[in-house]
Each structure stands twice: as C-alpha cells, then as structure tokens.
Amino acid sequence: MLLQMIGCDHHQAGLEVRQQLAFDGSQTRAALAAWHRQFPATELALLSTCNRVELYAAAEGEDSAPAAEELVASLLNFRQLPQEQLASQVQTLTGSEVVRHLYRVTSSLESMVIGEPQILAQVKQAYLHAHQLGCTGPLLHELFQSALRTAKRVTGETSLHKHRVSIPSVAIADLASCVFETFDDKHVLVIGAGEMAEETLRYLRDAGRAQIHVINRSAERGRELAHTWSGTYHAWDELWDQLVRADLAISTTSAGQPVVTGADYAQRVTPHRHQRPLFILDLAVPRDFEPSIGEDPGVYLYSLDDLDHACEQNRQARAAELPAAEKIVAQESSRFVAEINHRATTPVITGLRAGLERPKTAELERLFRRLPDLDAASQAEIRQFADRLVNKMLHPPLESLRDASQNGPPHGLLDALKRLFHLED
Amino acid sequence: MLCFTACYVIALVCEFAALWAPWATRRWNRLARVVSATAGLVAHTWFLGQRVAGTPQAPLTSHQDWYLLAAWVVALVYLATKFYRAQSSLGLFLMPVVLALVGAAQFASSAPLATFQAPRLWGRVHGVFLMLGTVAVLLGFLAGLMYLLQSYRLKRKLTVQGGLRLPSLEWLERVNSRALIAATLLVGGGFFTGVLSRLSHTNEHNFIPWADPVVWSLLAMLVWLVLAEVLRLVYPAARQGRKVAYLTMAAFVFLLFVLLVTMSADSLHMASPSDAAVLPRLPAAWLGEMF
C-alpha cells in the first residue's frame, strides 16, 4: 500500500504561489474527476485552503500507484502552471509522513495561526468532495476518519483551541463576554469605518444579534458599513448621544488626536449613564479615547495595546499546549501506521491459519474413524483441544508480526513465514 | 454530618484544583465535583430527614437545624450551577458558604426553639421565610463580591485566561438585583409572620418585644433592605453596576449582625419569666417563634 501527499503550504510557498495553486469548490470537483480518470486505481482527495493546497493519494499496490512526479505534473497542469518554476516548491511526502502530516494539519498544528478551528471543517469538506465523486476508498476513508478523530482528541484533551489569538476574537469572545451575558439586545456603537471595526463586527454578529449604530465623518462610507451590517448610520454630531446609549463602543477612526477626551466624556456622557457599564474597544492608532476615560467607574476601556497584550498571552498559552498536542498526534499516527502495516500481513496470517487448519481437520477425521465409539461430548472435547492447540501454535508468529508492524511493513518476516510454511503469494 | 461535610470539602478541594488542573483532567475534575456534591446532598438530606423523623417540627426546631437547612439550600444551588453554568468558578464562592453554615451549625445551639409559644403553622412559615431570606442575602453577597472582582480584573486588564472563570457582569448584576428583591420580600415576610405569630397567642405572650435585640436588629435589616429597594426605584444609578453590589454587601453586614445577635440571644432575648421557667435555654428568635 502506498500513501502519498503532494502540495504546498505557507511554510514552503509564498502567498502568490498558493493563490495560483488554490482550488475553489467547483475547481476541486473538476480536478478530482479528471485525476480519477487519469489514475483509476488510486484514491484521491484534495485539500485547498488559503494556506495550503494538498493532494492526497492512496493505492493498494505500489505498482498501481502513480509516481509523485506524475501527481505534481497533474496538479500543475490542471492549473496550467509552469512545472519548471513551481515543482521545486511542491512538497512530496510518502507513507507514515503523510499520516503524521494530515493529523497535524487537521489538528491545526500546521496552521498559520496554530489552534484555529476552521481547518477541521475544511478537511472534512475536502474528504466529502472526494467521497461524493467516488475518488475515495477504504484507505483514504480510514486515513481521514482517523485524522478527524485525532483532531477531536487534541481539541478535547488540550486547551490549544481555547486561547484566541486574533484581536477581534479576543476583544469579543474573551473580554466583552466578561461584561455582557448576551449581545442580542446590546447597543453597539461603531465610531469610524476602519477594517478592524468590520472584523470585530463579524465576530460580534456570530456572538449575537446586536443593534449596530455607525458614526463616521464620511457619511457615504458610514452608510455603506451600516448597510453591510444591517445597522443604522448617525451623523457625527450625534456622537455624544450615541455614547450615552451605547453598551459597547468600537472606535477605529484615523484621527490624529483623541476623538473623545476625558473632560468631554465626564461632562457630556458620564452624568447621563448612571454608571451603566460601557465596554470600549479603542482600535485606533493613535487612540480615539483618552486613557483617563477608563477611570470612570462604569467604563472598561481597552486599547489596541491592551488587546495585543491579551493576544500575546493567549499565544503563549497555546505554545504551552503544543507538546501535549504533538504527543497525541504521535500516538495516533503510530497507531494508524501500525494498523495499516499489520493489515498487509493479513494474507500471510490467513495462509498460516489455513495451513494448520487443513491437517487439523484431516487428523480429527482420521481419529474419529479409528475411534467410532466416541460419544458426541468426547468428540467435541477433542475438537476443542485441537482448536486450542492450533491457536497456541499460531500465537507466537502472529505476535511477532504485530510487533514487527509497529516499525513498518514486516517484509522480511513475511518472506520467512512464507518460505517456512510454504505459503503461496 | 461528618459524611456530608467531607463530601463538600472534597467538592471545594476539586474547585481549587480546577484552577490549575491540566485541560485533559478538567472533565474528570468536574465529574468529581458533581459526584461529591451529589453525595453530600444525599447524605445531608438523609440527615435532615432523620431529624424530621425524630422531631416532628424539624428541620427548623433549633439553631443547628436552621443552619443545616440553609446549608442544604446553598448546596442545592451549588449543584444546580454545575449544570447551569458548568464552566464558571461559582463553586469557589458557594462551597465555602455551605461549609461555613455547616460549621456554624456545629457551634449553634441544638436546644429546641420556643415553638410552643405560637401556632405551629406561623412558626414554620416564619422560620422558612427567614431561612430563605438569609440564603437570598448570602447569594446576593456572593454575586456582589464576584461582580467587584470581575470588574476589578477588567479594569486592570488582568488576564481573563486561567482557571478562575467568573460569570459576566451583566449576569452577576441580574443575580444581585434579584437576590436583593427576594431578600427584601422574604425577610419582610419572615418579620411579619413573626409579628402575626406573636399576636396570635392567646396567653400573656401576645405582645411584641420591640426591645429584644433580635427583633430590632432584624427590623433594622428589613428597613435597610426596603430602603435599598426604594433607592433602586428612585435612583437609576443604584439599579446597575457596582452600586447594586455595594447594596447587597451592606445587606450581608446586617445579616452578620443579626446572626451574631441571634447566636447570643439566650441572654438578650426578651422572654417572660414563665417562658424562662419552661425553657431553661430560650433560643434566639431567628427561627421558630421569635416573638
């Protein structure tokens, strides 16, 4: 049996190469269908995300499997890319390397942001696409299912995925959720229409159905942002009224000096809020809110630096979980490889068993003919004795085969058994 | 008693262990907390059931029973949080209160309360109201404490990661407000059922001993709770944020005062000479017939 993976990820190839190689859903289906026609005896699956394009191939016999160069050529040809330039950036893995790599990918240990959860769904999707097109078989099925199981183990037994590392996710999921139980009825004020505001709103939308209010100096851009997020646009002069009503404020203007000063806040907002909690995410550089506003009893003010600090702490926490995750991947990949290797010994084991079963049956028949007075109970006892004897004789070679399978296909041992017991291929 | 106390101690130890436990063991830790708390509650219930079987008016016939019943209610709340808010560290705050109440029961008088002085129904309603009012004040205090702690962590940008996971400020504020309302109603109900039970006497006891320290301390607490509610109605700032937490914490101080007075009420409680003759150790008025 031969397992292969060819492809590239953010470690080997730059964004430009990855973009050229990337496949969307329909392209993936078309490519798999074409490759399946080209290599009918090979199981195939294509994983294409923004950080990686990887083609997995598995074949029962090494003779029926395409060479790695053929797979690379097929991949590049489909995207009509020059082989001479890109072939060197395409990585090739075989056998247990493929297993370990897919397990690491699925568990998000190979991701650009280690621990990000999207990759699990992407791997599932890649397998489903291949399965629907009939490109998969028992080998890739086993491989992908065990990879998904491994990823679930990593998720369940480590806190790798618990520590968020992007600023918007930390701001909403780690910090704002400490203030608000739900975002459903919250008045969210977006000051400015920066990219970070949009990113944060994306996380916020996932967390609940907040009422979004946008204030921007440019009415056109403000209305556009409000429309995108089903919010309401307000003119800039409504800033103070909106701050009084807001539960959560996200500020991303490009103003050169603070938009909200401490004195203005104390005079125009504080008296009307009655210490109602206000969570402010000041994502602007330089700051939009003066730090002194954070001293107001009801205000929880977080600047970009504060959020970056929280992200860094989470990154460290993730790094601390890496050894445990690597250990799980190592355990699971060793187990899978051993099982696959052991599977290669099945014909020999069947032959061995049949080779002992035949004389056992013949000898039992001969014995029962010579002792015709034996009753049924005695015959059953003798049959059981013979079965146990055969099983005990088979036990040591089977154990040796299992042990040898841990370190790769036990070709030497299989050959020796075939010769010793006159087993046919 | 030792059995359920040990179970609660195990649950508390597991709560502390969860602060530092590796991720992989947290599921087992949670299971251990649920199992130990459930075992504790079963033993606790059995203990109170035995008391009821032995003393028909139990489990509110003595100070000891009263504390144990309050501990049972808080332990029930603790177990509920294991399912309702499994990820939070509420147990770190609730379980010490359970153990403190069990500990207080150890030192509290086991002498029967003066239940013979009033109709049995009034005495029970009075005791139950005040016991539940106490639990409400305790829960409000804990919610207030957690609110201030969570607010402090957010204000100082202290890392939110790690084992100590507190509920959101919004949730704590809600619990705080509801606990304050419940405490006002329950303590008020307890006070007035006490008055009614006293007035329902047909003998020379049908007067209200306003000079009794337990009576006036409880009345002071009730007045504070009512004032706090009025303040919350007329002053919007007192309905949200830290002010609610401060109000419930002040209510807790009143509660402590009432409990201390109650613990030493044998000498302070105003009892008629005839009562004193019948009851050598006239207990405080927190439960049973206090007036």
Image: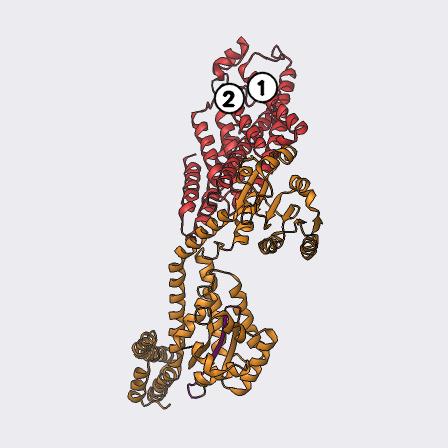
- Residue found farthest to the front: A256
Residue at numbered disc 1: B220
In this picture, is B268 found above or below A341?
A: above
In magenta stretch: residue A172: no
In this picture, is A375 found above or below B194?
A: below
Q: Earlier in the sequence, mark 2 or mark 1?
A: 1
Instruction: State which region is magenta.
Output: A49-63
Q: Quick check: A107 left or right of A284?
A: left
Residue at numbered disc 2: B257
Q: Looking at the colours in the rendered structure, which chain would you say is drawn in orange? A: A
User: Is residue B42 at least partly visible in the picture?
Assistant: no
- Mark 1 nearby-residue class (10 Å; few <14, some 14–19, many ≥20): some
Towards the viewer: A150 or A264: A264
Tell me what residue is drawn at x 37 percent, y 90 percent: A425
Asked whether the beta carbons under mark 2 and mark 1 sit within 8 Å of each other, the answer is yes
Towards the viewer: A172 or A13: A13
Residue at mark 1: chain: B
Q: Position of residue B124 (x, y in %)?
A: 59, 26
Q: Quick check: A362 left or right of A42?
A: left
Q: Looking at the colours in the rendered structure, which chain would you say is drawn in red? A: B
Q: Position of residue A218 (x, y in %)?
A: 68, 52
